[in-house]
């Protein structure tokens, strides 16, 4: 595996364009968690022409709902949830300035097209390695939709959060390429 | 007749919920290590290393392996000579879930109504299947089931003419289409036969079998080996990033079925293949 690229949030177009499928990255800075219910509310707010509770310009959304934090810890175990459930909402958020998403699993054509058009990147994190995942989260606070419990939007301060570029802004798809490389008949 | 206070059930279930979510079985760890040795993809090896590292950190921190601490699924083998005292068995079991998920800082992932989708706040109700068996003991198996892998599962009512080739095509296609969604490397539970519901249940029970174990019937043992080999030729690899370790195991369970029917179920399980049991 190539040496990981260190990137910081917010992401610029230059940073995003520089990322290619298969790149390992270490992310430092602020990222936001949001899952199904939060996405539904965000997009409904956009449809009504309202301002979002969080400014996602240049930001990364992590599709994740953590386990509760133990006393003295910023967060409980945290890892990615399956991304396709956010596909109906993601293009709209990308069109509104979102630059990155972290999750697991395939995205649909619309999301990939929006990534190309507006220069955004999709990272895969390791599903199920969530006790490890919690170690790169230094701070966490709920910033919106607290009533959603594990699905509330959290602002995370992360340090060297490990992820792999799955869909880059050039239309590349690691899931397809990776499978083609290691397929045997 | 042996009397058993349901308080014992609550205490045992509380601990099972925590232990199942924190400690991965030795059989899974062993297979993950073997896979790491064999994996050809550098990214795949990195992923497997991190998965193994996660197992150690979870143990050390007493933290759940995965943030999705699952739906609380139970298989109970109830000795017919057991007489429960002190209350309602089902309520006592659910109380154990409530306490375990709270005290273990586990995520509550159950909504009370599938359409309204309001979190029940304590991860109840559990899903419990009870088999009545001879004896005066109670065996309780707890298997937290994550949503990501459960969502990639399927039951298909095939035509009997499809035969074993039909089963192979269905299973392999299912794994292929699931891609990275169920957090590979996966364990694949396959149920063949029974009724629509029985088939799904034996597919789930297949996930409880020790990794490395073979089906007692040589025909199905060979089928398991063939399916595992074929699945691992798909190239999906750890987390779908490409590689040779797509599945850790394929387990097949079979049941007699109706002359007109040929149900086949695939229950997908992620590498966090969790289950713990206790005998009371
Ligand atoms: S599929 Fe398994 S490893 Fe992946 S997020 Fe769900 S419970 Fe965790």
Image (cartoon, coloured by chain):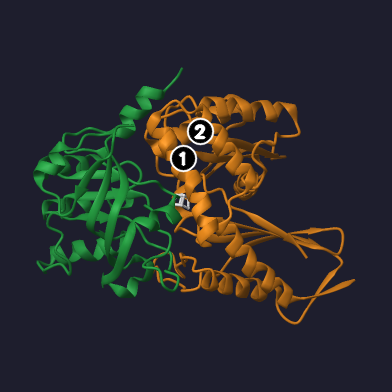
**Label 2 crowd bin: few (<14), some (14–19), many (20+), radius 10 Å:** many
Q: What element carries label 1?
A: helix
Quarter assignment of residue A152: bottom left
Q: Residue at x 44, y 50 (%)?
A: A129
Sequence order check, earlier mark of 2 and 1? 2
Q: Where is residue A83 in the image (x, y as percent from the top left)?
A: 32, 49
Q: How many marks?
A: 2
Q: Is residue A141 left or right of residue B43?
A: left
Against B216, residue B84 (above or below) is: below
Tell me the quadrant of the picture where the N terminus of chain A can be found: top left
**Label 1 crowd bin: few (<14), some (14–19), many (20+), radius 10 Å:** some
Q: Residue at x 14, y 63 (%)?
A: A55
- What's the chain of the residue with tag 2? B
Q: The green chain is which one?
A: A
Q: Which residue of the protein is positioned furthest toward the bottom in this rendering?
A: B86
Q: Is mark 2 on a helix, strand or loop?
A: helix
Quarter assignment of residue B74: bottom right
Q: Where is residue B200 in the image (x, y as percent from the top left)?
A: 59, 47
Q: Where is residue B165 in the image (x, y as percent from the top left)?
A: 58, 24
Q: Chain B is drawn in which colour?
A: orange
- What's the chain of the residue with tag 1? B
Against B64, residue A125 (above or below) is: above
Q: Foreground residue, A135 or A111? A: A135
Residue at label 1? Answer: B49
Q: Foreground residue, B153 or B257? A: B153
Q: In this view, does B108 lie to the left or right of A146?
A: right
Q: Which residue of the protein is positioned furthest toward the top in this rendering?
A: A185
Instruction: Assess whether mark 1 and mark 2 are in contact (beta carbons under 8 angstroms).
Output: yes
Q: Residue at x 55, y 56 (%)?
A: B59
Residue B205 in view of the camera:
yes
Q: Position of residue B133 (x, y in %)?
A: 82, 57
Residue at label 2? Answer: B36
């Amino acid at each position: 595996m190539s040496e990981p690229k260190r990137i910081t949030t917010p992401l610029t177009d230059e940073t995003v364009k520089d990322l290619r499928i298969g790149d390992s990255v270490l992310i430092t800075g602020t990222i936001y968690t949001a899952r199904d219910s939060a996405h539904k509310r965000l997009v409904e707010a956009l449809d009504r022409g309202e301002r979002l509770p969080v400014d996602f310009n240049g930001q990364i959304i992590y599709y994740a709902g953590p386990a509760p934090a133990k006393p003295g810890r910023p967060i409980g175990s945290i890892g990615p949830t399956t991304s396709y459930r956010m596909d109906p909402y993601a293009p709209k958020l990308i069109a509104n300035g979102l630059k990155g998403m972290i999750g697991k699993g395939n995205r649909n054509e619309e999301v990939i097209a929006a990534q190309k058009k507006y220069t955004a990147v999709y990272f895969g994190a390791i599903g199920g390695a969530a006790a490890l995942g919690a170690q790169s989260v230094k701070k966490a606070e709920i910033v919106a939709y607290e009533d959603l419990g594990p699905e509330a939007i959290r602002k995370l301060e992360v340090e060297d959060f490990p992820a792999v570029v799955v869909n880059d802004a050039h239309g590349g798809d690691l899931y397809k390429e990776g499978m083609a490389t290691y397929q045997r008949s | 007749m042996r009397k058993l206070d349901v308080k014992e059930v609550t205490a045992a279930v509380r601990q099972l919920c925590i232990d199942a979510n924190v400690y991965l079985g030795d059989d899974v760890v062993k297979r993950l290590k073997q896979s790491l040795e064999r994996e050809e993809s550098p990214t795949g090896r990195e992923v497997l290393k991190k998965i193994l590292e996660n197992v150690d950190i979870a143990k050390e921190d007493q933290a759940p392996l995965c943030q999705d601490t699952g739906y609380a699924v139970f298989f109970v083998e109830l000795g017919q000579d057991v007489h429960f005292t002190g209350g309602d068995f089902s309520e006592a079991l659910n109380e154990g879930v409530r306490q375990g998920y709270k005290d273990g800082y586990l995520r509550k992932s159950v909504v009370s109504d599938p359409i309204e989708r309001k979190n029940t706040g304590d991860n109840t109700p559990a899903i419990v299947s009870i088999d009545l068996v001879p004896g005066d003991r109670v065996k309780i198996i707890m298997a937290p089931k994550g949503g990501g892998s459960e969502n990639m599962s399927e039951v298909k009512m095939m035509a009997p003419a499809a035969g074993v080739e039909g089963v192979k095509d269905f299973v392999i296609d299912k794994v292929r289409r699931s891609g990275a969604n169920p957090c590979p490397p996966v364990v694949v539970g396959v149920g063949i036969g029974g009724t629509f519901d029985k088939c799904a249940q034996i597919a789930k029970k297949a996930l409880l079998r020790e990794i490395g174990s073979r089906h007692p019937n040589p025909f199905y043992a060979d089928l398991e080996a063939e399916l595992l080999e074929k699945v691992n030729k798909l190239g999906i690899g750890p987390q779908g990033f490409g590689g040779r370790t797509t599945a850790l195991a394929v387990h097949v369970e079979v049941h007699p079925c109706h002359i007109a029917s040929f149900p086949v179920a695939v229950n997908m399980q992620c590498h966090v293949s969790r289950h713990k049991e206790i005998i009371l």
